[in-house]
Amino acid sequence: MNTITVVGSINLDRTIRVTQMPKPGETMHTQALFSAGGGKGANQAVAAKRAGAKTHFIGAVGADDAGRTMRELLAQAAIDITGVVTVSEATGQAYIIVDDHGENSIMIHAGANAAFTPAQVAAHAEVIRGSDFVIAQLESSLPSTIKAFELARAAGVKTILNPAPALKEVPAALLRVSDMIVPNETETEILTGIKVTDEASMQAAASALHALGIAAVIITVGAHGAYYDVAGRHGIVPAFPVKAVDTTAAGDTFIGAMSSVLAPDFSNLEAAITYANRASSLTVQRFGAQPAIPYAREIQAASKTDDA
């Protein structure tokens, strides 16, 4: 069982279901409105834990009802939240619109996620040093993320960067200490300037990311699966065809599930991606972020059904 430390965002998600995305200036009725646990960091931690990893979290919430709710949800998921501090800023929140095709539009208010500090991360250095992987995104404090990855690199712990929401220029100090990067097509184009359209463009984008000093590249391409490029091995691991009703947290599920079974030397990367694809295929068939993330027993059962 891998030990995972996630450094990142905690949001209370507020989701609105609609038949189709509204046009500018349009008013429409909604189909449903609900709240659930979210935030890319928290989603990835929940996915890793449910897939079987021992999971720690470093981040921040506010001293408000949303913060108390998120602490309770993470604790109920059996995630170690010793590293979650309470700050004066409001807990992060995300406002999500999901249409009948399962596509979403997400707006984020960072709040507390932008407020925790490198010193607060350093206070949990032993947790980082005892991990197999440290995972981070770009929804929270960049200096704190860099500090976490620097501590991991110094201890020989592998780091996984999910560059989302995408930045045109990710700090070089962060890229230097990232062992693996996992962008989607849009994020890949923003990072490299290369539009992902086929395997050749994926390989070109991966080469551009390697040139930034990152050893392992995975580009997730939705219903087509995931392209990987590491140590001279590359290819596409296909997705499992399902009818998606909500793609929220699909990418987070992928990263969390993959990290739970991935060998630190990336030797079983193809198998880990297959496992992660199966987990994501279950997530997109359900509504919400954390409520949709599957458990290991569900992933394994679905895999056995495919093999039958």
Image (tube, rainbow, N blue to C red):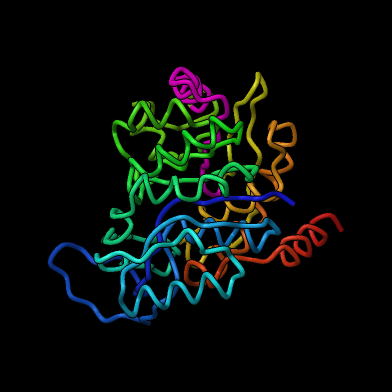
Q: Which residue sits at x=40%, y=57%? A: 9
In the image, is residue 290 above or below residue 185?
below
Asked whether 248 or 223 is in front, the reply is 248
State yes or no: residue 206 in magenta. yes
In the image, is residue 12 above or below residue 171?
below
3 relative to 221 in the view: left or right: right
**Residue 78 in the image: x percent, y percent?**
61, 69
Asked whether 25 or 287 is in front, the reply is 287
Range covered by the magenta-colored residues: 202-223
Residue 50's quadrant in the figure? bottom right
Residue 233's quadrant in the figure? top right
State yes or no: residue 287 in magenta. no
**Residue 181 in the image: x percent, y percent?**
50, 35
Q: Quadrant of the C terminus?
A: bottom right
In the image, is residue 9 above or below residue 156?
below
Q: Which residue sits at x=70%, y=46%? A: 274
133 relative to 38 in the view: left or right: right
**Residue 294 in the image: x percent, y percent?**
64, 66
The answer to whether any part of residue 94 appears in the image is no
Q: Which residue sits at x=63%, y=45%? A: 130
Report the label total.
0
